[in-house]
Image (cartoon, coloured by chain):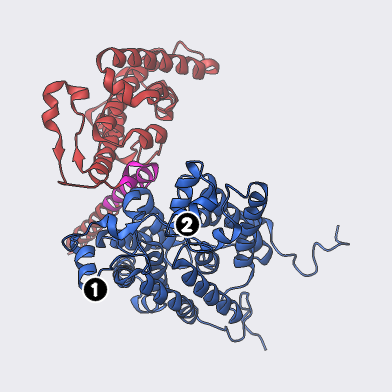
Chain colours: A red, B blue
């Protein structure tokens, strides 16, 4: 275990194996709640919290649970954690809880969480599992927030509306009206807007990667030429 | 001597190139477009020119981005036809940014993101229209009054000022210039429990059969469509199945409850039924391709038009009906493959 390994795990979660952009998992909440930035952020953080706790617990008990019953065991762990999160949000972020509604209990069915338990936590010690969960969760949250911001700006012309639901009353000042006197482009708020937005994000990611690859091949080629001399 | 085998269809002289076909469809559309402009004012012309300009610009930009040759795709007329159909669907007094958004969405998203002409599963003009309809329902239901009903109409300069600056001449409001379409007011009033005869008599927008002014546009569209069938630009299957099924289902419900149901002719000559049946549903890229499939496809559109008009949330359903059946077209084609000669006959296993 060295630092290199952790940075590799983090890179995979945040970028090269991003839950939303590459694995295309957890689409249901991704598409349903990202109509505003704050909704996206709220659900993203809740999912990250569940993911971190479930990865840790699964990693701890990986040598105790027999492989035959591992899936039911994981699902029970995840469901218990989601129930806890749901109750906590109901207590402390009640308005946000009302807006996100059914999508908080549905975190249980987010394949990304069971997917990380099954493909990573069960094969690794707790520390890498924790790093993996954090990276995956933050990668997912980032996409939720960016998609939410895109849809909110295009759909309502604002940014960080309802921020007080999450951060308390002082955060009402965070709301930015990007486009004054905007009629609103409903399509961005409706489900098609989510699909189009996600498509654009995936395309952007692929574009950035393709560009990076092109630059690196060009560099290695010039390096080879330089060495040849 | 060995000749290279070509793929079907084995046309010796294809009757029309894509370009020839597109421009003939545009030609068939023009008389109706002219009457539409005459009835509803300069806004129609501005919409058509603006949509065409934006569509061609977007087409050129997308072709450049995709690294495709510009000339054949720009001159084939498909973008112009898309723009004209979109402009036909839009209200005559539409702010410029609405028309531009619709045309850009149609060309960029509905056409080129799917791979360009020939690869788009959905009719681009209808996608552009539906995007505007679901996003800006208020703007899209403000139709200006036909010539016979308007107290006065905007001249070219005033229309341009409204379209590009949303400024109206002093002393007039948008409400004075616009009214609900015949289909729209029929739907609202039926919802209040009135009988169709009362509604048709009480509102000035209704003529003897459909809306005032609409009947001429629709008759010219019908003539243009029949000419296209005569010239074999489109086959008869889709329009006949669409209008036939619309008339059939409208007749059934009309017979059951004539007091509270609009007549079949009202359905035929109001809204976009004829435009849809001849000019939109027949788009060769997005429609079913086998003849039997075309009948199913058209019938589906006709029934969906009636269902959406009668029980849906929007006054007209042509765009949604066409898009829904576009989605079904590959499946329809799969189940209506024609029998290959020599296989699958009566004696064949």
Chain letter for mark 1, please. Answer: B
**Residue B62 in view (yes/no):** yes
User: Horizontal and vertical percent for residue B217?
Assistant: 46, 71
Front one among B173 and A55: B173
Between discs 1 and 2, the one toward the N terminus: 1
Would you say B40 lies left or right of B291 here?
left
**In which quadrant is the C terminus of chain B drawn?**
bottom right
Provide the major secondary structure of the magenta segment.
Answer: helix
User: Of all residues shown, which one is farthest toward the bottom?
Assistant: B1
Which one is closest to the eye, mark 1 or mark 2?
A: 1
Q: Residue at x 40, y 30 (%)?
A: A112
Task: State yes or no: residue A187 in magenta.
Answer: yes
State which region is magenta.
A186-209
Binning the other alpha carbons within 10 Å of mark 2 as few (below 14), some (14 to 19) or many (20 upward) gives: many
Task: State yes or no: residue B162 in magenta.
Answer: no
Q: Residue at x 24, y 47 (%)?
A: A183
Chain letter for mark 2, please. Answer: B
Would you say B166 lies left or right of A111 here?
left
Find numbered disc 2 in the image and state the secondary structure of the residue it sits on: helix
């Amino acid at each position: 275990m060295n630092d290199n390994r952790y940075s590799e795990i983090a890179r995979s979660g945040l970028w090269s194996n991003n839950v939303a952009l590459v694995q295309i998992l957890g689409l249901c909440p991704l598409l349903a709640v990202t109509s505003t930035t704050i909704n996206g952020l709220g659900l993203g953080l809740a999912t990250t919290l569940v993911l971190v706790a479930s990865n840790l617990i699964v990693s701890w008990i990986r040598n105790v649970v027999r492989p035959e019953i591992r899936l039911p065991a994981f699902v029970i762990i995840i469901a218990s954690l989601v129930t806890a999160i749901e109750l906590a949000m109901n207590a402390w972020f009640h308005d946000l809880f009302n807006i996100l509604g059914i999508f908080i209990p549905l975190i249980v069915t987010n394949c990304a969480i069971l997917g990380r338990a099954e493909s990573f936590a069960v094969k690794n010690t707790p520390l890498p599992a924790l790093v993996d969960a954090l990276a995956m969760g933050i990668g997912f949250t980032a996409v939720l927030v960016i998609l939410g911001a895109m849809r909110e700006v295009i759909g309502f012309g604002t940014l960080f509306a309802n921020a007080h639901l999450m951060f308390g009353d002082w955060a009402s000042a965070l709301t930015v009206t990007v486009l004054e006197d905007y009629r609103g482009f409903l399509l961005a708020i409706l489900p098609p807007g989510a699909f189009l937005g996600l498509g654009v994000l995936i395309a952007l990611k692929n574009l950035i990667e393709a560009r990076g690859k092109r630059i690196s091949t060009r560099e290695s080629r010039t390096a080879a030429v330089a060495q040849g001399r | 001597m060995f000749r290279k085998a070509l793929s079907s269809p084995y046309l010796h002289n294809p009757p029309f190139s894509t370009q020839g076909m597109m421009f003939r469809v545009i030609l068939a559309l023009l008389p109706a477009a002219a009457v539409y402009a005459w009835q509803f004012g300069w806004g129609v012309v501005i919409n058509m020119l603006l949509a065409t300009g934006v569509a061609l610009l977007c087409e050129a930009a997308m072709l450049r981005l995709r690294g495709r040759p510009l000339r054949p795709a720009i001159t084939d007329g498909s973008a112009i036809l898309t723009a004209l159909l979109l402009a036909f669907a839009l209200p005559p007094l539409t702010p410029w940014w609405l028309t531009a958004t619709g045309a850009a969405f149609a060309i960029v998203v509905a056409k080129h993101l799917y791979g360009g002409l020939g690869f788009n599963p959905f009719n681009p003009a209808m996608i552009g229209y539906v995007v505007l309809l679901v996003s800006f329902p208020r703007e899209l239901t403000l139709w200006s009054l036909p010539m016979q009903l308007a107290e006065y109409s905007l001249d070219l300069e005033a229309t341009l000022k409204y379209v590009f600056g949303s400024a109206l001449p002093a002393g007039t409001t948008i409400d004075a210039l616009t009214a609900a379409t015949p289909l729209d007011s029929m739907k609202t009033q039926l919802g209040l429990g009135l009988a169709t005869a009362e509604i048709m008599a009480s509102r000035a927008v209704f003529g003897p059969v459909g809306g005032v002014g609409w009947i001429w546009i629709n008759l010219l569209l019908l003539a243009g469509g029949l000419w296209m069938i005569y010239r074999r630009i489109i086959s008869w299957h889709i329009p006949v199945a669409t209008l036939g099924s619309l008339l059939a289902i409208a007749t059934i419900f009309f017979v059951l409850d004539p007091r509270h149901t609009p007549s079949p002719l009202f359905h035929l000559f109001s809204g976009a039924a004829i435009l849809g049946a001849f000019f939109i549903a027949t788009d060769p890229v997005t429609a079913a391709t086998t003849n039997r499939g075309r009948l199913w496809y058209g019938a589906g559109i006709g029934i969906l038009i009636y269902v959406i008009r009668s029980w849906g949330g929007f006054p007209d359903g042509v765009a949604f009906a066409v898009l829904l059946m576009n989605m079904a077209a590959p499946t329809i084609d799969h189940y209506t493959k024609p029998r290959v000669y020599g296989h699958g006959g009566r004696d064949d296993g």
